[in-house]
Image (cartoon, helix red, strand yellow):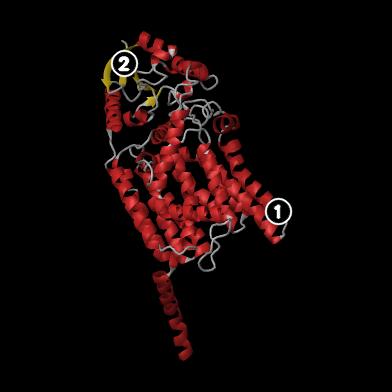
Amino acid sequence: MPAETSTLTRPAELASRVRERVRTGYWTQLVPVLAVLATLTHIPSFLRPVWSPDEGYLATQARMLADGGVLYDTVVDRKPPLLPWLYEACFSVFGSLSLWPLRTLAIVAHLVTAVLLASLARGRWGNRAGAAAGVLYLMLSIGLSPEDTQAATFEVFMLPAMVAAFRYAERRRWLAAGIAVAVCSLTKQTGGAVLLPVLWMLFQDARLRAVPWKSALLKVGFGFALPITLVAVILTKPKGFLFWVVTGSGDYASLNGDWLQMFGRALGNSAILLAAGLGFLFPLGHRVWIRYRTGRPLPTRGESHGAPSDLWVWLFSSVVAVTTGFHFFGHYYLQLMPPLVLLGVGAVSVSALRWKPVLVYSSVACTVFWALAVAWPGEQMSQNNQVATAVAERSTPKDTVLVWGMHPELYWLSDRKPATRYLTAGFLTNFSGGKGSADVGEQYSVPDAWQTFDKELSTNGLPAVVVDDSGSAPYQPSQVPAIENLLDTHYQVVGAYGDAMVYRLKN
């Protein structure tokens, strides 16, 4: 009888232990807090239909794919395919009238990134540092212009795979690290920069443990090559994938442009990020400066090893990624946040500083950026809504529309099909935001773009409505004879909204 009673009580004891572990466990306590913080910091993302042209481009792309378009053929962009496919999948399940499913997934992406950073920091500096890393990342994740941090765009969905690649490499799981680098690269090309710290850790591990490195390198290479080959050869057209993702962005990423403007944007966004993360970046900078002045390693608290070289290599690779193309858009700087957070957490963890001032400053900065997102001016959004309404009123759902400008969200907002695969004037003129008027014009277009554009219009008919959203940009119709002739010959002005002109097909 006692043995029978013992057998009967074991499930109850086990359930009690599980409940106690859930109640007191590190992750079961931390993850809900991070989930709430991720949601709170990104609530402003739901306050407007579109935050950036990138969201509008992806939404329009997804609709084209759903209508039978072929990626890197009749649907084109200079980006890898994972995010367009994600948009398409969400639209197929939830409909294409709202981006709230993508905004929700963006919050999940931030949460996963925070949890992975917490795991990395906990393994290096203990439980408190792990919690701080997750919290500080989420507060820093809105520390730029709201248009860059509240939008569901490439960098946000790239970060979980990027941090996962670093974490797998730290644990010597080389095949998984290679796969994670590939997923990161297939979300945005510059995500592949995390391969540098992965390889750094691989060779450092081989050197310190005196083990062969070739096997590990083969695992990283195979893990990296397999997903990219699968996507490039089987899921897309290889020639189109190679051109649009790898080789077709040379002019877009050239050194020509308005250097003063580019330099100003680089300094401006760097200063904003510095202000947002000053709570933990100041201790990091102070330790680096003291070590530089003394030339000696700094004393550390406890047995922590501070900020090892792999984090600095990761930060360096991220800086290179942000610099690539010399555009310095704010959302590029999201790639800097994970290594900066870990370096800052490491600096505070091994010093005599208390966490309270760091967290207080970060909380205040986060609150300021949150309030800024809520109160962010909406003039451009208001104008886009007016233009989209005018387009919808002057066309039918079967008509096509041409937006001559850099606001592809007008297609999505008006619920009209694009007349061409080139959703912005940049493909036909090489214009890109922030690089001035150098190398902008018909002669600098994507190879054969104008021939393809003319063929599309001759095959499918002229668009019922044209929106000239160029304003005073160097690609305005007066500077592009093909567009100027098209408008003068076939269209008449039917409305003006700010600097946007709406044209209707004559007769």
Residue 44: image location, x then y, percent: 31, 45
Q: Label 1's element? A: loop
Question: Picture coordinates of residue 197 (x, y %)?
Answer: 59, 49
Q: Is residue 126 left or right of residue 222?
A: left
> Which of the pair 174/347 is nearer the observer?
347
Quadrant hosting residue 26: bottom left
Give the Cα distance between marks 2 and 1: 65 Å
Q: Residue furthest bottom?
A: 1
Answer yes or no: is residue 87 visible.
Answer: no
Q: Nearer the viewer, residue 238 or 316?
A: 316
Residue 433 is drawn in which quadrant? top left
Q: Is residue 45 above or below residue 27?
A: above
What amino acid is labelled 2 in the image?
Arg
Residue displayed at 34% across by 50% down: 365
Residue at 33% from the left image edge and 25% from the top image edge: 397
Q: Are marks 2 and 1 in contact (CB under 8 Å)?
A: no
Q: Residue 356 placed where, x, y %?
A: 37, 62
Residue at screen point 34% across, 48% down: 42
Q: Quadrant of the C terminus?
A: top left
Dot 2, how many residues are within 10 Å of its Cα: few (below 14), some (14-19), or many (20+)? Answer: many
Rendered image: mark on residue 270: none
Is residue 287 visible to us here?
Answer: yes
Near mark 1 (Cα within 10 A), the count class, few <14, some 14-19 or many ≥20, is: some
Please name the amino acid that badge 1 sits on. Answer: Trp
Percent of width and height locating residue 386:
26, 27
Query: From what the image shows, is residue 16 above or below residue 184?
Result: below
Q: Is residue 197 left or right of residue 348?
A: right
In front: mark 2 or mark 1? Answer: 1
Q: Which mark is residue 213?
A: 1
Q: Is residue 319 above or below residue 431?
A: below
Q: Secondary structure at mark 2?
A: strand
- Residue indicated by mark 2: 504
